[in-house]
Every structure is written in structure tokens, then in C-alpha cells.
Amino acid sequence: MPRLVKSGLIQCSLPISEGEGSIGEIKKAMVDKHIPFIEEAGKKGVQVLCLQEIFNTPYFCPGQDKAWYESAEPIPGPSIDMMAEYAKKYSMVMIVPIYEKEQAGFLYNTAAVIDADGSYLGKYRKNHIPHTSGFWEKFFFKPGNLGYPVFQTAYAKIGVYICYDRHFPEGARELGLNGAEIVYNPSATVSGLSQYLWKLEQPAHAAANGYFMGCINRVGTEKPWDLGKFYGTSYHVDPRGQIIDQASEDNDELLISDLDLDMIEEVRATWQFFRDRRPETYDGIVKL
């Protein structure tokens, strides 16, 4: 029988922003907006569900206001514990990206991975941190220090890459070498310079490494920063680099697709990239 995994992606706009409530109220409003989509995913039989980058806050990085440091929380912690209840309720693996506080001054852009029984499996910390053109992330996040882990879940081997990471093929390859069958990339990206790369880089990663990807982007505009329009268009892509489905540019949406993991074996038997790679010739790449 085929190894089918029903995958879900949630893209959401911000219900209230800075000036319309406290940081705690903004976080609660964002979580409350996600809950109906999470419930819908569970009721529709989604087996792996991924939320967008720092899902329970605005994308606050266009500013440099240290007040947002207080929105960070431990992993596990209140938000992850809450999501674990939904994972357990629906036997649904969840990838939950939040602003993580390890200790005072140690803050990360992180995604927690929760298994279908509600158990916490581990986390990925965003490795590549931009600091340019309104994406002032080094003010808020330390670079990740956990490498490129792959998590054996109830349904598939899951890897995570976060937003700006997608511009770097090295980590995407390492996720494949570490055994990932599906790689999720929760993002917050706006119209402009990199929009044409949105449907170029991630299909290229999927094809180069022979795995599926789930690519999530939030929607709408967020005040007071007005960085631009988050253009949604979340999608799944198969190991041939073909986009399977796509969400809208403007709407809050749950996107669901059936992923046939047997395709990974078929594609890798045709394109023997892992067999034919020459790591002994690549030393120069880490010396430059």
C-alpha cells in the first residue's frame, strides 16, 4: 500500500497589532484565530500540520523594539503545551514555530515538533539570520545551534527549515542526508525583492534532495511596521520539484494535500544524487 501522509499548512493574517492591545492580548488573539483552523485540520484527518513562522505574534522584525523580547517563551512552555493537547486530541503531528527564550538574552526563532501522541520530540532553531532591508532579525534572534535535526514522527521523518534558511542549499541538503522525507519551511515574506524566489528555491531543494516540502507564508499587512504585503501562496512540492497545490495570496487558509512518500524511493532510484555526490571534493566550500 502507498505511504500516504495528509499534510496541512495554515497561513494567517494578524487580527490585532501593536497599539490595539498588549503583547499578551495580541498573542492570545493570534492563537484564538488559529484554533478553528487547527480543529478543522484535525477533523479532516490531517496527520502533519505546520504553522507559520513565529505563528502567535506579528512579524515584529521590521522594528527594533526590545518590548517584543517579552513575547518569547520556553520550549516546552505554555504555547507548546497548548498545541500538544490538540496534537494528542487529533493524533496529529504538529510543527509549531514560536519565539523561544532559553534564558535571559538567549532568544531564538524556533519551531517545536510535537508527535501525534502529544509528546514533544524536539526543536529546530533557525540557523541563518538576516539583518537587512526591514528584516532586522539579529536584534531579536541568536543564530541556531542545533544543526539540522530530523524527527521520526508517527507518520514520517520530518525536517524543518525556517524562512531565510531557504536561500541556503547547504542546510537543505543536510536535512536530506539526515533522512528527512518532508521538510517544512514556515515563513514570513513580503512582496518585493525575493518574491520570485518563493517558487524557485524550495522546488529546487525538493528536487535536489528527493523529498517533499511544505512551504508556509502568512498573509496581509501588519501595522505599525508596514513592511509590505505578506503574499501567502503557501504550497506543497513533491520530490520532482512539482508544486502540488497552492493557497491564495490574500486569505486565511488551511491547505491540505496527500503526499505519497513512496515517490521518494521512485525519484531517488532515478536521480542518484546522493550516490553520485562527491563530499571529498567540497572542502573549499567551508573555507571561503
Image (cartoon, grey):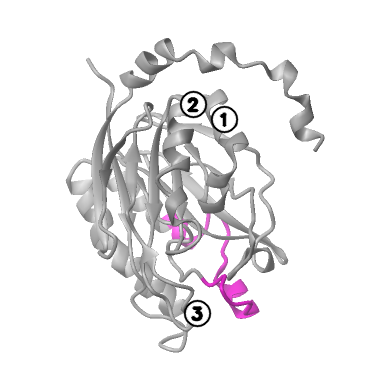
Q: 10 Å neighbourhood of mark 1: few (<14), some, or many (≥20)?
A: some
Residue 78: which numbered mark, if any?
none
Q: Nearer the viewer, residue 84 or 138?
A: 138
Q: Is residue 74 left or right of residue 184?
A: right
Residue 66 percent location from the top left of the image: 65, 78
- Point 78% across, 25% down: residue: 283
Task: Return the residue at label 2.
Answer: 209
Q: Quadrant of residue 211?
A: top left
Residue 44 sits above or below residue 230 on the image: above
Residue that protrudes farthest toward the left in the picture: 44
Residue 173: which numbered mark, if any?
1
Q: Is residue 68 magenta?
A: yes
Q: Is residue 189 left or right of residue 42?
A: right
Residue 204 percent location from the top left of the image: 46, 34
Give how far apart the Cα atoms at labels 3 and 2 are: 37 Å
Numbered circles on residues, count:
3
Residue 183 percent location from the top left of the image: 45, 37
- Point 49% across, 26% down: residue: 209
Task: Return the residue at label 3.
Answer: 225
- Point 39% across, 56% down: residue: 217
Q: Quadrant of residue 242?
A: top left
Q: Nearer the viewer, residue 38 or 202?
A: 202
Q: 10 Å neighbourhood of mark 3: few (<14), some, or many (≥20)?
A: some
Three-letter residue code for mark 1: Arg
Residue that protrudes farthest toward the right in the picture: 287
